[in-house]
Amino acid sequence: MAVTMADIAHLRKMSGAGMMDCKSALEEAGSDFDQAMEIIRKKGQAVAAKRSDREASEGCVLAADKGDFAAIVALKCETDFVAKNADFIALTQSFLDAAMQHKPASLDALLSLPLGDGRSIENHITDRIGVTGEKMELGFYEFVKGAATVSYIHSGNKLASIVAFNQPLDRQAARDIAMQVAAMNPVSITPDEVPQKVIDLELDVARDKARQAGKPENMLDKISQGALQKFFKDSTLLQQEFIKDSKITVLQYLQKQDKELITTAFKRVTLNME
């Protein structure tokens, strides 16, 4: 059976592969559409196996929020050229849309979700690898839940943040907090939530610096505790200086909106080297 342009166009729409790749797959499959899709997928799997040791350090990071749920997805690739391609961004957006609709509990659960054509996200990634010839992977999936949520995507699609709150709030105020998270990269919301190993490391580093500076041994603990408090001020969200007004903290900014307002969770994903 001769391969028709309609079949090629349909396979191209479903797979994202080039016209000649679709034509070749259909010819090899005797115009059997399902078999042609499998040929394209196997090509993607072969490319993925060959490039498994390559670093996928570029990509696209997108985020969205709706009511009590917000999510971030990051589709990674090898080059900035592919990352900026409209089809690659659209593919990432389709993964985010699926996450927002189904609210999966893990990255593996997201990978198994079907898109509109019935194929899983994992299969879509494999198929796109065959098209671009680059290693690709769903590098991150993060989500938060709360009485209200907000998302922020930094220009360039390499950095995004999501934040949850204990009650509804003005949209711009919420976005300000998401921008704070993106810009200042806090380690936790409050000092109580900082992991003990991080605290221990900060104390050890501060003691070592003080010792090298010639401070007496009996002063080291006091100096290190002072350094720890500075770390909390710089690195915990509610104690950080507010980026739009350094005279107040993030907590004070929230309390200006409502005395009971508080941030309950946040996530930040970046592909930038930090």
Image (spheres, helix red, strand yellow):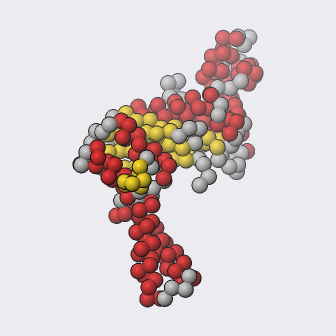
Where the N terminus falls, by quadrant?
Answer: top right
Classify residue 153 as left or right of residue 79.
left
Can residue 89 be seen? yes
Q: Is residue 112 visible?
A: no
Which residue is situated farthest in the front direction here? 247
x, y (%) of residue 197? Answer: 45, 69
Location of the C terminus (image quadrant): bottom right
Q: Quadrant of residue 18?
A: top right
Q: In the rendering, at what x and y percent does residue 95 appear?
A: 51, 34
User: In screen coordinates, is 188 left or right of 262?
Assistant: right
Vertical position of residue 3 compared to residue 48: above or below: above
Q: Which sits in the foreground, 137 or 44?
A: 137
- In the displayed structure, would residue 221 be above or below residue 136? below
The quadrant in which residue 20 appears is top right
Q: State the count of labels.
A: 0
Residue 36 horizontal/vertical position (percent): 67, 24
Residue visible at 38% across and 58% down in the picture = 239
Left or right: 6 as drawn, with respect to 233: right
The one nearer the camera, 206 or 73, is 206
Q: Residue at x 64, y 43 (%)?
A: 58
Give the residue furthest to the left.
Answer: 260
Q: Nearer the viewer, residue 106 or 271?
A: 271
The residue that appears at 45% across and 56% down in the rendered structure is 186
Instruction: Tell me if residue 171 comes above or below residue 249 in the rendering.
Output: above
Q: Position of residue 216 (x, y in %)?
A: 49, 88
Nearer to the camera, 217 or 25: 217
